[in-house]
């Protein structure tokens, strides 16, 4: 089973199922509390097949571990394939749920070692496995098992639990050609919390294979991906976003751009977080006298649909949501009043960058809308125009693909917006086009300000992705 080669990737496929009844089917509450979502058999076959394709098996026994083994289905499938090929195997599993661990023991037989416990707490030293395979838990450590739960080895306390298992898997795999094959939440491909683990992988491993699912998977309602990594003394650069964008048919990222610094050098960018969201909940009313609340769903390129399109906030439908400033606590009233200044609002969870200028400073941005306040040297309309371009959208996809709520949505944040380049060419014509509502012309003209032709594959793709009314 020896072999090398470039990473293979597979297109998305629907993933469903939460485990077969004859194995173990914990309640949804139990699964949610531990982050446990059992792997459907077709994904088991896909992951095991990819993990063993070109696998550099050792001369002796092949040692395989699943640090979150559930009912043992991944270990069993890997063992079956290796045994058919004439290999001896040693199976090791760890599982926090005693009932699932017992099923795994029965399934894997007396030669396997299945430990009941939390793999992130377990003392694995010394450990050197030929294959680490698994579908680790998907949940935040803060919602998992209570205040005693340790943080993942790398990343912030808000990192998804799967990130900790990804880090652990790398440490369990043997340094010389050991493989790691995991099902993961797609967000780990681009999230800030998982960045330390990705950097470790880039220093120690190469990406062999990848796959992603288009729809939220299992009962966890999480969009997932799967990766196979191989530890290597000669790692290769990994473009994590390509795991997603290669299957979306996105054009290549433009490289020869004529630029003059970045957007972040010209604006003050601010994002709203959970505190602001909950601070607003009791103050949002229908059609009141306060300032309009503008959510992401009300923003299209160069237009705000407040009062024309319904939206949802705090699980309620509003036709014209407003903020009653008198209902806000002093802290959040101060925050809301600070947002009432001229700004550009940028929506999140969209297919292209969708920005609109609030020239009079009348709107309170919802969560997770980002607001940009131009500093000296640029105008609101110039900022909105630069964002309303194929270049801005494609570069944001390169920076954040996989972090949205779906694989076809961009999660827009302050850091990625600040990093976008500013074109060196003039923007007057692009601004005029945007003021006239001609979004497509604006994008073409901004790309020309970047030194691009404007009639290439990138522009064609971007126009097709625009909201229908703005093409």
Image (cartoon, rainbow, N blue to C red):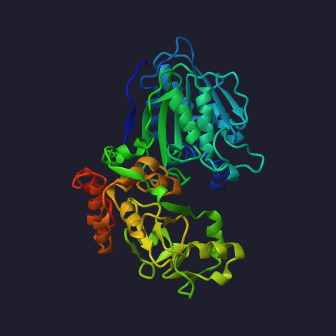
Residue 70 visible in the displayed image? no
Q: Is any part of residue 197 visible from this angle? A: yes
Q: Which residue is farthest top?
A: 59
Give x and y (percent) for residue 33. 68, 51
Picture coordinates of residue 202, whole percent (x, y): 51, 32
Residue most toward the right?
148
**Residue at 53% over, 32% down:** 201
458 relative to 76, above or below: below
Relative to residue 422, is residue 152 drawn left or right?
right
Which of these two is toward me, 309 or 29? 309
Question: Which residue is painted at 69% across and 52% down in the image?
Answer: 142
Residue lying at 50% horizontally and 71% vertically, measured from the top left: 295
Q: In the displayed structure, does residue 107 sit left or right of residue 145? A: left
Tally of numbered tags: 0
Pick the residue in front: 252 or 91: 252
Instruction: Establish if 46 lies above or below 173.
Output: below
**Nearer to us in this view, 225 or 52:** 225
> What is the quadrant of the N terminus in the image?
top left
Name the spot of residue 73 as percent of width and height, x first. 56, 35
Determine the residue located farthest toward the bottom in the rendered image.
Answer: 289
| Image-quadrant location for residue 128 | top right
Q: Give 33 or 405, whichever is nearer the viewer.
A: 405
Query: Dividing the image into 4 quarters, which one contains the C terminus?
Result: bottom left
Residue 382 placement: quadrant: bottom left
x, y percentage for residue 424? Answer: 34, 54
């Amino acid at each position: 089973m020896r072999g090398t080669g470039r990473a293979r990737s597979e297109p998305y496929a629907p993933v469903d199922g939460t485990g077969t009844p004859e194995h173990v089917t914990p309640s949804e509450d139990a699964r949610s509390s531990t982050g446990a979502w059992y792997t459907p058999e077709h994904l088991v076959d896909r992951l095991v097949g990819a993990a063993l394709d070109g696998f550099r098996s050792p001369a002796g026994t092949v040692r395989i571990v699943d640090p979150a083994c559930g009912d043992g289905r991944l270990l069993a499938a890997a063992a079956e394939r290796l045994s058919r090929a004439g290999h001896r195997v040693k199976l090791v599993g760890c599982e926090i749920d005693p009932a699932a661990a017992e099923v795994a023991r029965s399934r894997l037989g007396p030669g396997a070692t299945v430990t009941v416990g939390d793999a992130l707490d377990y003392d694995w030293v010394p450990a050197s496995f030929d294959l680490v395979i698994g579908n680790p838990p998907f949940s935040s450590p803060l919602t998992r098992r209570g205040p005693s739960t340790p943080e993942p080895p790398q990343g912030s306390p808000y990192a998804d639990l799967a990130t900790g298992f990804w880090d652990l898997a790398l440490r369990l795999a043997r340094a010389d050609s050991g493989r790691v094959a995991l099902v993961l939440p797609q967000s780990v491909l681009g999230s800030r919390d998982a960045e330390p683990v990705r950097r470790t992988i880039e220093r120690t491993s190469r990406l062999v294979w990848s796959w992603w699912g288009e729809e939220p998977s299992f009962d966890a309602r999480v969009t997932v991906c799967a990766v196979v990594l191989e530890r290597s003394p000669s790692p290769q650069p990994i473009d994590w976003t390509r795991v997603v964008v290669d299957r979306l048919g996105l054009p290549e990222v433009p490289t020869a751009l004529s630029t003059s610094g970045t957007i972040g050098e010209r604006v003050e960018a601010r994002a709203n977080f959970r505190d602001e969201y909950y601070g607003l909940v009791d103050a949002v009313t229908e059609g009141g006298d306060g300032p309009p609340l503008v959510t992401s769903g009300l923003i299209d390129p160069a237009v705000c649909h407040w009062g024309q399109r319904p939206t949802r906030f705090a699980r309620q439908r509003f036709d014209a949501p407003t903020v009653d400033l008198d209902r806000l606590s002093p802290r959040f009233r101060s925050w809301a009043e600070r947002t009432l200044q001229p700004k550009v609002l940028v929506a999140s969870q969209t297919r292209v960058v969708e920005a609109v200028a609030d020239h009079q400073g009348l709107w309170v941005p919802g969560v997770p809308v980002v607001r940009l306040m131009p500093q000296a040297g640029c105008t609101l309309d110039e900022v909105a125009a630069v964002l309303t371009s194929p270049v801005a959208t494609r570069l944001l996809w390169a920076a954040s693909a996989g972090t949205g709520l779906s694989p076809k949505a961009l999660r827009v944040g302050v850091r990625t917006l600040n990093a976008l380049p500013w074109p060196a060419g003039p923007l007057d014509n692009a601004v005029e086009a945007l003021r006239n509502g001609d979004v497509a012309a604006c994008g073409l003209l901004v790309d020309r300000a970047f030194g691009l032709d404007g009639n290439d594959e990138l522009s064609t793709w971007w126009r097709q992705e625009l909201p229908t009314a703005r093409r």
